[in-house]
Image: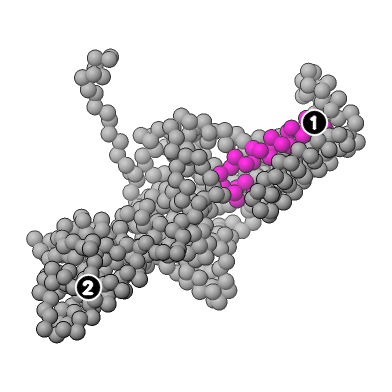
Amino acid sequence: MVDQNTMTFEKLITLAKKSRDFSQIENRVNDTKVLISYFSTLVNHELMQTSFLSNLNVKDKNLKIKALKDLQELLPLSEMSITNDIAEIENKLYKGQLIVQIENDASNFLLININSCQTGLRQFNDSENEFSVVGPKMGFVEDIDTNMNLLRRKINSPKLVIEEILIGSLSKTRVMIVYMDGITSEQHINTVRERLSDIDIDIVWDTSLLDQVIRDNQNTPFPLYLSTERIDRITYTIVNGQIAIFSDGTPYAISGPSTLFDFFISPEDYYLNWVLGSFFRFIRIMGVFFSIFTSSIYVAVLTYHYEVIPKDLLGPLIESRANVPFPPILEVIFLELTIELLREAGARLPTKVGQTLGIVGGIVIGQAAVAAALTSNILLIIVALSALSSFTTPIFVMSNTIRVLRFVFIILASFLGGLGIILGFVFLLAHLFRLKSFGTPYLVPLFPFRKNALADTFIRSSFKFINKRPEYLRPRETLKYGVKKKKKTKGDLNDE
């Protein structure tokens, strides 16, 4: 029985040693060797030093530690227990407790609760930039040890592995690679290790810099890795079989491999009923197409394709543009640039002032532009809705890409009309087909086609249909959770 427990504990320690934040300390109480095992990101180091380690320095040479009870009597701590249950030891270790062994009592373990409760240190941020109405609001902070603490509290599993690497010849910035052992593809893990190890740079300012350096394609406006400050979002990606990268000094983490559709998924989709979650996700994706193509279609139609305008709309359209002296392309560029200026100004100003500027400035400038015959009422509505649609994208970096693409299609429409929009869309698809994230195609599951992964792409299907990890991530363990069929009760049979 003793050997079996000891062997099981050794396996637990072997798994824990894969993570950079796992530590073991050897100490002595007189002639008795004491071994302490713990996760440095989960324990309170000040309490550990003052109430635990300092009391091990016993000066009484007549004191003999024959069992863990003798050691327990030395410590001025209330939350302690002795056990030989490996399941309990595993649970407590990953919740921030110390596991103490002595050589005279190898079959038992002393559990000491001194988990991290740092005073004066923010435990988490409010995720203001990725706000959701439903669900937790917890976000990461700038301190990487605190972030690892938050992550380990969310994923309380020995499979969670944290590796550390120092990047920056001047800054020596701590960068953490986080993944699930036995789930995440070894090929992806090795790819991340190699790319981070090959970085030769002076200072790492932010994870966004790492994103740009390690990405598969340096010349694309599309984000190839998911950047987020939300704990629940990064937890989902790690459990799903992706790899997360943290950098000291920034509250944002990046994860990959990522696909195009990952950037239109909101954590809120999973907190709502699947019908509501699917509806809002579909609206989000439709909003992207509306934002990119609406202004360019307006330019193409008014410049080259008057014949496609319905007769009932032709009158109001001509009337609204009767006094506008500019061609459609200049009219659209003027309004689009105005919207972008308001957006940039609002982002740089304090929150309250920025909100006022966005609302009041938009109304005043819009009305003044129409009154001065610089633009038409119809275009003002189109551009406003187009800008509004771009705000539905949950990830800010993808929202920026959509803003840039809108201008590209407007210029193409001004030169070639509808043909320019079609050619632009074809080139855009060809570019997306070539993109990869850690070697994974960017458009998967559409290209290459993966039928099983479509259940969580355009819509969010019921949980019983999305209980497997996507095949394109090459997970070593496919099943996320089992789905039990509901047993029919006597009442259910009567209802039938």
The reply to whether residue 352 is in sight is: yes
Instruction: Assign a secondary structure to mark 2.
Output: strand
Q: Mark 2 points at which residue?
A: 35
Do the residues under discs 1 and 2 have CB atoms within 8 angstroms? no
The residue lying toward the viewer, choosing from 424 and 248, is 248
State left or right for residue 440 relative to residue 162: right
Q: Where is residue 467 in the image (x, y as percent from the top left)?
A: 36, 39
Number of the label disc, if any, that sits on residue 377: 1
- Can you say whether 44 is above or below 379 in the image? below
Quadrant in which residue 324 is drawn: top right
Distance Cα–Cα, label 1 vs label 2: 76 Å
Instruction: Assign a secondary structure to mark 1.
Output: helix
Quadrant in which residue 375 is drawn: top right
Q: How crowded is mark 2: few (under 14 residues within 10 Å), some or many (20 or more)?
A: some
Q: Where is residue 183 in the image (x, y as percent from the top left)?
A: 35, 52
Residue bounds of the magenta highlight: 376-400
